[in-house]
Amino acid sequence: MSLPPGQRSVDGFPRFGTHLHHPPPPVPADPVIEIGGAVTEAVAMPATELATLPRQELAADFHCVAGWSATGLLWEGVPFETLFRTKVEPLLESAASISHVVFEGLDGYRSIAILEDAMASDVLIADRLDGRPLDTDHGAPVRLVSPSQYGFVSTKHLCRIEFHTTEPPLPDRWSPIAAHGRARVWQEERHRYLPGRTVRPVYRWLIGPIRALSARGSRNVPR
Ligand SMILES: Nc1nc2c(c(=O)[nH]1)N[C@H]1C(S)=C(S)[C@@H](COP(=O)(O)O)O[C@H]1N2
Ligand SMILES: [Mo]
């Protein structure tokens, strides 16, 4: 299988992320996914409900914007579209009015997707990876997986999904690595303002230090 432009495969599946200063957040005893934003009523859905919805397996590679790809992962969970149709649409005045979705993790991490990208058939609310429950390194208890977009969209430790009728304010507007709004890997949408291939070396340079930091906070590596 070929990789998207500018990606190189790595061995295994490293823990990676921007919220590295601490180990992964503890898993709550009774995790919930809050559904909020432009809904008529906010709800807290117990994560256990994912077991009662139609589930899907998804074999996919995982591409970080920094340039590494983990290959041949097998995810399991509920398609975002299924969750949207069954749990969110009934809470909306008009589904057509939703333009953006914000995914928030227990560590405070946030990612943004346009609704159209989140509704793609390969976007999953995943609770299992390679036949086992998600471990804390990879997003326990539940994470988003959107393999056609760079990894930063796939919020780990998912605890809240927020629906918006306009684009939420851009958190990293002035950052040198300002995130692309769609982040599609095959289009190489790495950066909001610059062409993807021109920023490859800068991002690649970040892989080593970030991997080292992430491993330090990892629960799977002896410390
Ligand atoms: N909650 C949370 N989700 C996150 C991150 C993070 O720091 N915190 N990092 C993102 C980035 S940049 C990447 S590449 C992937 C890494 O996923 P992995 O640790 O399972 O490899 O998670 C994404 N989701
Ligand atoms: Mo990433």
Image (spheres, grey):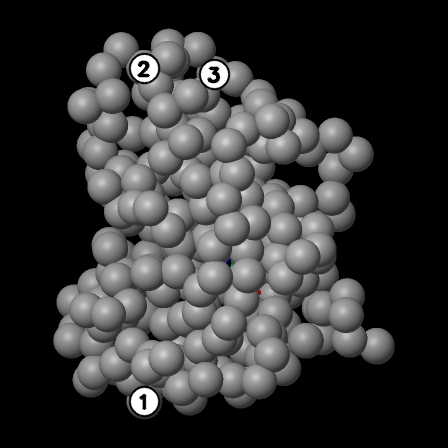
Q: Earlier in the sequence, mark 1 or mark 3?
A: 3
Q: Which quarter of the rendering shows the N terminus?
A: bottom left
Q: Residue 124: percent from the left, percent from the top?
A: 45, 46
> How far is mark 2 from mark 3, CA to CA?
10 Å
Label 2, on which residue?
92
Q: Residue 122 versus residue 7: which sits nearer the camera?
A: 122
Q: Residue 113: percent from the left, percent from the top?
A: 31, 46
Q: Residue 118: percent from the left, percent from the top?
A: 32, 43
- Secondary element under disc 1, as helix, strand or loop, is helix
Label 3, on which residue?
42
> How far is mark 1 from mark 3, CA to CA?
43 Å
Q: Amino acid at mark 2?
A: Leu
Residue 110 shows in this picture? no
Q: Which quarter of the rendering shows the C terminus?
A: bottom right
Q: Quadrant of residue 181?
A: bottom left
Q: Residue at x 29, y 84 (%)?
A: 6
Q: Residue at x 50, y 44 (%)?
A: 56
Placement of 150 over or under 56, stated as above or below:
below
Looking at the image, do the residues carrying marks 2 and 1 touch, with CB atoms under 8 Å apart?
no
Q: Earlier in the sequence, mark 2 or mark 1?
A: 2
Q: Tell me how many marks there are.
A: 3
Q: Amino acid at mark 1?
A: Pro
Q: Residue 180 versus residue 93: which sits nearer the camera?
A: 93
Whether ligand 2 has any atom under 8 Å from the Cβ at mark 1 is answered as no
> How far is mark 2 from mark 1, CA to CA?
43 Å
Q: Residue 90: percent from the left, percent from the top?
A: 37, 13
Label 1, on which residue?
201
Few, some or many residues within 10 Å of mark 1 (<14, 14–19, 20+): few
Whether ligand 1 has any atom under 8 Å from the Cβ at mark 3 is answered as no
Whether ligand 1 has any atom under 8 Å from the Cβ at mark 2 is answered as no
